[in-house]
Amino acid sequence: MNRILTAEILRNKTDHSIGGKARNLAELSHLGLNVPYWIVLSRETMKTFSDEAGNLQLPSDLLDEIRSHFSDSDFLAVRSSALDEDGGDFSFAGLFETKLFVRKDQLEENIQEVRHSSFAERVQVYCEKNGLNHPSGLGIIIQVMIPAESSGVAFGVNPVTGNRKQQLISAVYGLGEGLVSGELDADNYLVDSEIHAEIADKTHVFQMNVAGQSGIVKEELAEKKRKKQVLYKEQILEVQKLVKKLGRHFHKPQDIEFAFYNRKLYLLQSRPITSLAKVADKNDAYVLWDNSNIIESYPGVTTPLTFSFISKSYEGAYRLFCEYLGVDKKIIEQNKGVFENTLGLINGRVYYNLKTWYLMLALLPGYSINARFMEKMMGVKERFDVPQSYIASKRLAWWRIVKMVFKMTSRYFSLPRKRKEFGVLLNETIANYKSIDFSEKSANELLQLYLDFETTLLNEWKAPLLNDFFAMIWFGRLQSACEKKLKSSNPNIHNDLLCGSADIISTQPIHRTIALSSEISQSPQLKKLFVELSSKEIWQEFKTNQSPSNEMKHLYDEIVRYIADFGERCIGELKLETISYTQDPTLFIDIVKTYVQNGITENIRSGNTEEEIRSKAEKEVNALLGRKFYRKYLFNKTLRKTRELVSSRENLRYERTRAFGIVRELFSAMGIRFYAEGILDNDRDIFYLTKEEIMQFIQGRAVTRDLRKLVALRKSEFEEYEEMEAPAERFASYGAVYHANDFFSTEKVEQLKGDLKGIGCCPGRVTARVQVVKNPKDIATLNGSILVTSSTDPGWVTLFPTASAIIVERGSLLSHSAIVSREMGIPCIVGVTGLLRTLKTGDMVEMDGSTGFIKVIGKSNEEINR
């Protein structure tokens, strides 16, 4: 075994016991770069000459052999070379000792000091923090000492901003020890196509101890050099060229140490930049992510199957929508990447990609004529660069606008008919699929049923899209009319006028559930059943006690009828992995039990609250408009159309829920089939595959055949997402989204200012303690507390009657929680920035559902005791 290893010996040696730094030096030497001559003592060599106590005793012949390698040098440098040092993931920068200007007669003691530094506490802490094993000994590098006139470090990319096209060079006079340790201020040069110099006021320099001892000393720098640039332009460009060359060779941006002596550049070491995984390139592709609205439909972690399904659904829906608004089919096809990327999945949670939404806006007729107005109308808060190819000439834009107005006017008048036709198609399609026994179908047959369903219904979603568009327009007109024409003291009178629409389907589940609770509470026999038995026992009792005259039979029939009507209206109803009431009726029995046990009946909730709010607002309108008959006619026309469209919007959202229910049943049946055939370990594992992966497996196009292993990987990853804190509601990403971006940055989230303020949705002033609820399954009743949450979906309405008021962090005036709270007459505020960062369970607040103001009047005992 070679006791001393040189670069030449290491050219053909694969032994890795020399450590990371020595391996790098060997590679640099083999490249023919100007690296000061060096040798390395391997870890085995160090162990060979150590006693049981770990003390190093190098034989004199070995020391003589070392010195013979440096016969032309008076001073040497002694450096560490640990196994993981200067690797791609961990640098160990500055943790081990380095000895400079070492005299040859003091070699052994300096080698001993460097070796002992591996046992320092700082090394132990670093290893523990990064999950590394403690270095079991070191390789030791001995190298010719360069009496540098200037030294520095250079990074192949800007490590601060992440700019991959810019190099950062820092330099000091003398040795680089003061720069690496952070003890000295250095000149900084940012280099791309130009040199951007930041010259420091340099006060000291590290150089050789001229007293004749080994080591270096810190001395004051000559006054004339303090504000003088350390490196010449030629030297800066030479270092830039070197660091870029090394990055290309190692296929990773490098962090190098260099020195200049007699105007000659020496390379002292090179290692990968270990911080790149944490710093995104802010000059790369910029995207803004937001889930403030979509979280209402897809709360929490969403499985791969649901995300892959809704991604295609959104793509198809908005291609169709843009086509309806007059965007040429050819332009839509040219920009298909925009429509394919409307959604993102960030740590398992669904987000809107606002950049693609902005680009869709830019495709619309009229954007080139009045971009700012359109951005304001659509609520765009941040502008993105729009490629010139998106923007039509003004002449062409005007022509497209004329065509769009003509087409949309025609579609507006035909909308009632289109909604009716869509309802007929949907009911017929769903009835047809409900009649099919999916358990008798093969996986291939189930897939074909899904594809037929997609073609028949999911691709024919024109009526809901048009209704949403016109609902937004008419709601805006109503709000504007209330502000400009009425000048009411009630800022939310437009909301009050929309209360009490009996045709909104979203309120029917809650009213019918309360009716069931009332029926049970009036019967001692039924009430005892729902108080004492579990949900599964109650359901079993229903099935075994079916006498025609029995009140059990009537209640059972009513529950079955409810599930037939609203079995898909549950918490997380648009997520395919959700188990609906149709699939497991005992989940609905749980809801009814909660109502019964908490005394929620028709007696405690007046059914007239909504009508009273609406009637009061209508009387105020009549008083304000007085005898202005024409203005009153126009206002009432706007109000009627808004009520019609908003009601239809909510009802059509439920039709979407019913359609998603069929998709849920189809893929659930596929999961059962895959489990039966031994393809998956559990039928519900199907939700951890994407729609495309399922189709490709069935059709013979899969690139991964072992679905068990794929599911295991996904489940592990998504379980981690469940444990993680949710990303910020709005954040930016740069470059590759899943690399080096901070999903938790609140930089893009609106900052809090004073009292909380949101959008008032239903009037009423309430003073009560708040109950923060993240999942409605976690709590049975609110007992009159104010419900505070991030977002709600239609499944939350079963919890609403137990709340004195509702405050939601996300949402708008047309969100589900806003509409349903108005219908139920529960004071409600939505769109409250920073709500969950401010309020904790037990806090006492006063909220006003008209103005949207929330005042904290007392903190919870837990907060006070902290």
Image: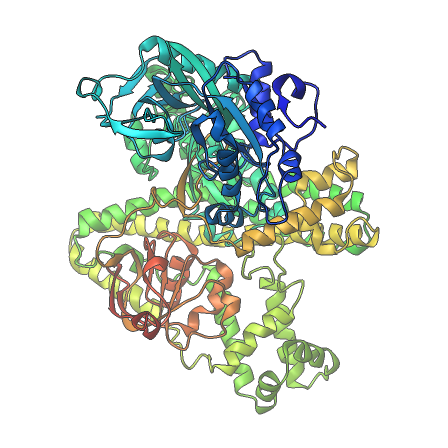
Residue occupying the point 59% across, 89% down: 528
Above or below 566: residue 558: below
Residue 62 placement (x, y as % from top left): 62, 28
Quadrant, the N terminus: top right
Quarter of the image holding residue 325? top left
621 displayed left or right of 290? left
Outermost residue on the front side: it is 60
Taking the image as drawn, is residue 342 in sight?
A: no
233 displayed left or right of 268? left
Q: Which of 356 and 654 is in front in this view?
A: 356
Outermost residue on the right side: it is 677
Residue occupying the point 47% across, 32% down: 276
Residue 161 placement (x, y as % from top left): 38, 30
Residue 265 placement (x, y as % from top left): 42, 13
Above or below 577: residue 530: below
Residue 159 placement (x, y as % from top left): 41, 30
Residue occupying the point 31% across, 57% down: 495
Q: Which of 264 and 819 is in front in this view?
A: 264
Q: Nearer the viewer, residue 254 or 621?
A: 254
Quarter of the image holding residue 251? top right
Residue occupying the point 26% across, 49% down: 635
